[in-house]
Amino acid sequence: MRDKTVAELTALSDREQKELAAYRDALSGRKPGYRHLLAAQKLVGQILEIDPQFGPANNSQRAIRGEVKNYETNLNSADALIKAQRFDDGFAPIVPYLAFADEDPRVAGILHAAYSYHLDRGR
């Protein structure tokens, strides 16, 4: 039974690692792929729920947490700057994530606010 469980957890861990790699590829290639980070996060959570000591998942969880923290920090920073009417400064932190605008309404909202500000100024 333990061997079968380890095999299944390993298969899930492989999927999670592929999702994380797909997210990183999307991020560096400036293409949609935020959903891959969410999928990796969900998979590693499921693995650790079954076996909190599963080594590969513990290692991946740190990497995923780092990616999520970086993403959330940049979005929160951008949101605060937009709310402070600093539109250009608010736009800068989300530049790496612009391709995720269709996947995350927060990115789309920041993008829209910065765009609208410049459009209104041009009128």
Image (cartoon, rainbow, N blue to C red):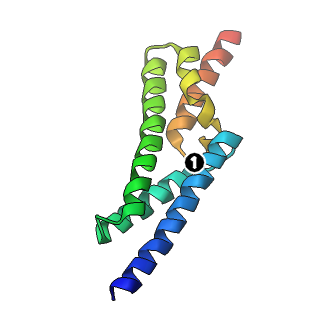
Q: Tell me where residue 114 appears, x and y as whole percent.
A: 59, 22
Q: Tell me where residue 83 appears, x and y as whole percent.
A: 44, 19
Q: Tell me where residue 1 appears, x and y as whole percent.
A: 33, 89
User: Does residue 123 show up?
Assistant: no
Q: Is residue 80 above or below residue 45?
A: above
Residue for point 60% across, 43% down:
100
Q: Residue furthest bottom?
A: 1
Secondary structure of residue under mark 1: loop
Q: Is residue 41 left or right of residue 29?
A: left
Picture quadrant where residue 69 is located:
top left
Residue on which disc 1 sits: 103
User: Does residue 51 show up?
Assistant: yes
Picture quadrant where residue 7 is located:
bottom left
Q: Is residue 108 left or right of residue 43?
A: right
Q: Which amino acid, by three-letter code, is at mark 1?
A: Glu
Image quarter hosting the C terminus:
top right
